[in-house]
Image (tube, helix red, strand yellow):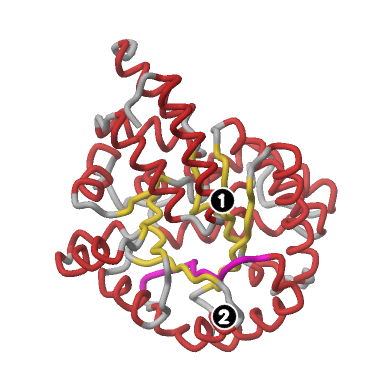
Amino acid sequence: MNPAPPDRAALLGFVRAMPKAELHIHIEGSLEPELIFALAERNGVRLAYASVDELRAAYAFTNLQSFLDIYYAGASVLLTAQDFFDMAWAYFLRAKADNVVHAELFFDPQTHTDRGVPFEYVIDGLSRACAQAWQELGIRGELILCFLRHLSEEAAFATLEQARPYRDKFIGVGLDSSEVGHPPEKFERVFAAARELGLHAVAHAGEEGPPEYIWSALDKLKVQRIDHGVQALRDPALVQRLVRERVPLTVCPLSNVKLCVFKDLRQHNLGELLAQGLVATVNSDDPAYFGGYMNQNFVETFAALELDAGQAVTLARNSFEASFASAADKARYAALLEECCRAHGVAA
């Protein structure tokens, strides 16, 4: 492979160095095979795979559902609060290396409570990791509780009720898991109840599902962000609304390719999303399964689409704007970005 031209090398160096917020990370999806095996040994869990290499080789997905099948199998090793802490702490160490300054972590309590793991263990381990990430790494970590959309409205209500005593430990609710066949309006009443608790709202829509799911997430669930949203370009009226209302999209390029939403990164529509004026951001989704954390998503996407420094700055600014950070933190992040731009000779 020929080395990148000096200007491209400098650009990719800037992209790696710039501060950024990650807004679409499933913390269970950061569970690397090595940690899965370590936790399995610690907890006496028998895995269906003989080695780390055999497990990693099984990461051959053809669609969202085939990924979810192995994703839930990996989560089976999470049994104690310490397990959840160790998983989140491993993510934060990688986030620090990628210059992530703010991370809003999705977690799926139903994946664990349905296995008999107390909700308390899940929230305790994750929230302790968030606190330590701020104290030791300078990363502001927040938690967003996600409902599994392939399960019932009744199950989602039960999870929200379980979460009430821990309301101070998470900032919002989301909707994830199998998209097709499970439209957002299925959970309209649950999201209304969450809003009454003062929680932020986001939802996966327009990944494999149609633009109609994005409309529904906005109108029925009253979400503030759309997770994925890459199908929005199929509906010009929807694009106009998203631009007008500055509704952020938390785009996950490597995930989109791994799950065959796009054939390869050269076909990804991130550049077009930016050109249309959408508040697009870059995120890693389930990085242990999809082949890359934040900087890997940035570097590979910038190389494939030949994006420039101005678009890098826009993506970083969008990530701060789209976050649920305080005004003071957003100002701090913006100052860090300006400092990085000056250091790399990039126009802010």
Quickly name the residue at label 2: 194
Task: State the mark number for residue 328.
Answer: 1
Judging from the image, what secondary structure is the residue with disc 2 in?
A: helix
Report the residue at 66% width, 46% height from top.
49
Left/right of residue 55 with respect to residue 273 in the rendered view: right
Q: Residues within 10 Å of mark 2 (few under 14, many from 20)?
A: some
Q: Nearer the viewer, mark 1 or mark 2?
A: 1
Quarter occupied by the C terminus: top left
* Number of numbered tags placed on the structure image: 2
Residue 292 can be seen, yes or no: no
Report the residue at 54% width, 42% height from top.
332
Quarter occupied by the N terminus: top left
Q: Position of residue 18 (x, y in %)?
A: 47, 31
Q: Position of residue 131 (x, y in %)?
A: 75, 50
Inspect the magenta stretch and tell me whether residue 176 lies in it.
yes
Which image quarter: residue 137? top right
Which image quarter: residue 229? bottom left
Report the residue at 79% width, 54% height from top.
45
Q: Position of residue 276 (x, y in %)?
A: 19, 52
Q: 245 or 170, which lies in front?
A: 245
